[in-house]
Image: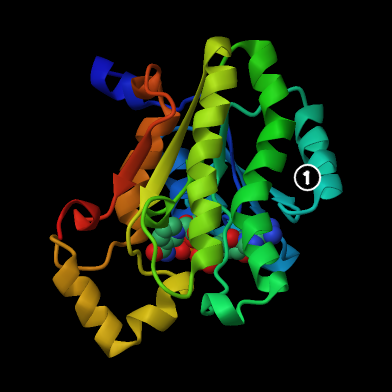
């Protein structure tokens, strides 16, 4: 392998991607596998997990599955303990699982507030707290927290989501503050508007769709593929001195008015 490719190679690494039975998580898992990692897919539905595992296995990748709910502390602990049992460590963790529950602030229920905070923020705390001790012991590891444009920007009806993603940005920096000295690199990846199941309702809304195309300098929605290179970079030796950073992949949306 030439020197350049070596810098981005994930050969011999084992990567856990949460919420990876579809969308951005599945695309990132596939990309990490194509860069040489063996990947662990995660989701709550055993059926969806098995379909995604078959898909990547059929493409010749090394894939495992771990069905657990990232918001449930007991399940998270049990799942990570079981993944650690085989003796092969988790080298890369991508905290990707996330949800939306849209409503104006005055109408937002506490349940919808809490669900979004739990899934988009607390989950990263729980899964990282379970995975990081092994990384710290081995003095190496990469954690990528899937943040958002909404880690920095606000919009009506998504206060819960912006609060969670803003918190995730600061959790990323806090992990850096505590774990960088143990040779862990913890960074955020902030997608712009990407076409997935999560944004289907927005893509189908003609007014919103044309606003996004006009507002984004690249003139289009992002695809899940657009995020893969950045995820590989942050997971690879090429990013060994990149820490606490938020890498925005948004077609330029956040830098123009
Ligand atoms: N699509 C976008 O435009 C966009 C933009 C910025 C950030 N993001 C973030 O990217 C991540 C992936 O989003 P997506 O667009 O692929 O959405 P998606 O809905 O297609 O995927 C989210 C995944 O998370 C899983 N998940 C949800 N709750 C879970 C739980 N409790 N336990 C385990 N898995 C759970 C879902 O089952 C699903 O597989 C999310 O964190 C999202 O907030 C998406």
Label 1 crowd bin: few (<14), some (14–19), many (20+), radius 10 Å: many
The C terminus appears in which quarter of the rendering?
A: bottom left
Image position of 243 with respect to 221: above or below: above
What residue is drawn where x is 48% and y is 42%?
169
Residue 124: which quarter of the image? top right
The x, y position of residue 183, in whole percent, is 53, 13
What residue is drawn where x is 67% and y is 40%?
125
The N terminus appears in which quarter of the rendering?
A: top left
* Front residue of 7 and 245: 245
The x, y position of residue 117, in whole percent, is 63, 57
- Residue bearing the label numbered 1: 76
Residue 152: tell me if it is visible: yes
Q: Is residue 251 left or right of residue 184?
A: left
The x, y position of residue 69, in whole percent, is 74, 56
In what element is the residue under mark 1? helix
The x, y position of residue 38, in whole percent, is 56, 36
């Amino acid at each position: 392998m030439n020197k350049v490719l070596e810098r981005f190679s994930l050969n011999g690494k084992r990567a856990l991607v949460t919420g990876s039975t579809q969308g951005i998580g599945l695309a990132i898992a596939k990309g990490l596998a194509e860069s040489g990692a063996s990947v662990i897919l995660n989701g709550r539905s055993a059926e969806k997990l098995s379909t995604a595992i078959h898909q990547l296995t059929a493409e010749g990748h090394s894939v495992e599955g771990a069905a657990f709910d990232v918001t449930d502390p007991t399940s998270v602990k049990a799942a990570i303990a079981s993944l650690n049992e085989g003796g092969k460590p988790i080298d890369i963790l991508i905290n990707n699982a996330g949800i939306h529950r849209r409503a104006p602030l005055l109408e937002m229920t506490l349940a919808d507030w809490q669900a979004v905070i739990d899934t988009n923020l607390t989950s990263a705390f729980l899964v990282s707290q379970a995975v990081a001790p092994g990384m710290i012991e081995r003095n190496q590891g990469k954690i990528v927290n899937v943040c958002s444009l909404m880690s920095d920007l606000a919009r009506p009806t998504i206060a819960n989501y912006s609060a969670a993603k803003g918190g995730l940005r600061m959790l990323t920096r806090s992990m850096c503050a505590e774990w960088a000295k143990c040779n862990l690199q913890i960074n955020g990846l902030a997608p712009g508007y990407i076409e997935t199941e999560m944004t289907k309702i927005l893509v189908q809304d003609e007014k919103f769709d044309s606003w996004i195309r006009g507002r984004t300098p690249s003139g289009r929605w992002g695809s899940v593929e657009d995020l893969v290179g950045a995820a590989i970079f942050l997971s690879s030796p090429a990013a060994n001195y990149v820490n606490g950073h938020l890498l925005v992949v948004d077609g330029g949306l956040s830098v123009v008015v």
